[in-house]
Amino acid sequence: MDKHTPVERKLKSDIIRKNLLRKSLQKKLFSVRRWSQLLLKSPKNQQKKRYQESIDRYKSQIDLLKKELLKKNEQLEKRILEEMKYSEEEVKAFQDELKKEVKALDKIQKELDVTSEKEKGAKDKLEIQQKKRRLEKMLADESKKIQESEEELVSEKRDEALFTLELKRIALEKELYRP
């Protein structure tokens, strides 16, 4: 029951695209390394020439991919930091809301207990039963709100962990692929 904002969804899809770009870069780097090894082992000049042309072509593609990856990393890093800051504020707001709802729940429970005590000595039991049903409904509604808030807190913590991991990956990629 994750309720993510459009900004969070866009950020996550951009992270996925960036990681696909990184995987493509890694595949090209692996191919260049493999062709370099074949170039050294190849006895024929025609094969060496073919390998060298492929290596040169892929190296130019790799340079473009590195530049694009570094650019995306910088953009994502800013957006993730901004979102994490917002997420921290959002989590605090949810915690405050949760505390308020728990207090309201306690108040309703006390009213329900008072109603039960009054029911013993009251003449008009129908009115008290209606009030009791209303209070029980309010109690159920508050319980549902608390559960939703707790689920949102779990979701926010999971997002924060994901974003923290992505920030670490971005830092590593900056070091690996810087020009």
Image (cartoon, rainbow, N blue to C red):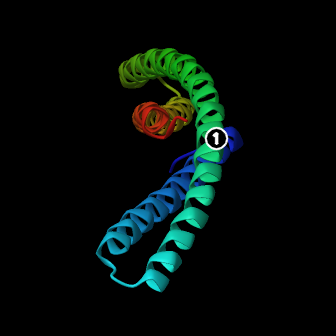
The quadrant in which residue 175 appears is top left
Question: In the figure, is residue 25 to the left or right of 8?
Answer: left
Amino acid found under the numbered disc labelled 1: Lys
Q: How far from the left and from the top, in percent, is residue 75? A: 66, 33
Question: In the figure, is residue 57 to the left or right of 99?
Answer: right
Give the class, few, some or many, for how many residues have Cα within 10 Å of label 1's Cα (few <14, many ≥20).
Answer: some
Query: If the image is split into quadrants, where does the C terminus sit?
Result: top right
Question: In the figure, is residue 57 to the left or right of 22?
Answer: right
Q: Secondary structure at mark 1?
A: helix
39 or 54, which lies in front?
39
152 or 137, which lies in front?
152
Name the residue beneath numbered marker 1. Answer: 72
**Residue 33 showing in the rendered view:** yes
Q: Where 25 sits versus 46, above or below?
A: above
Q: Where 63 sits versus 88, above or below?
A: below
**Residue 157 showing in the rendered view:** no
Q: How far from the left and from the top, in percent, is residue 96? A: 50, 14
Q: Residue at x 57, y 30 (%)?
A: 77
Q: How far from the left and from the top, in percent, is residue 119? A: 41, 25
Q: Where 89 sits versus 161, above or below?
A: above
11 or 5, which lies in front?
11
82 or 54, which lies in front?
54
Q: Residue furthest right?
A: 6
Q: How far from the left and from the top, in percent, is residue 154? A: 40, 36
The quadrant in which residue 44 appears is bottom left
Q: Residue at x 52, y 35 (%)?
A: 178
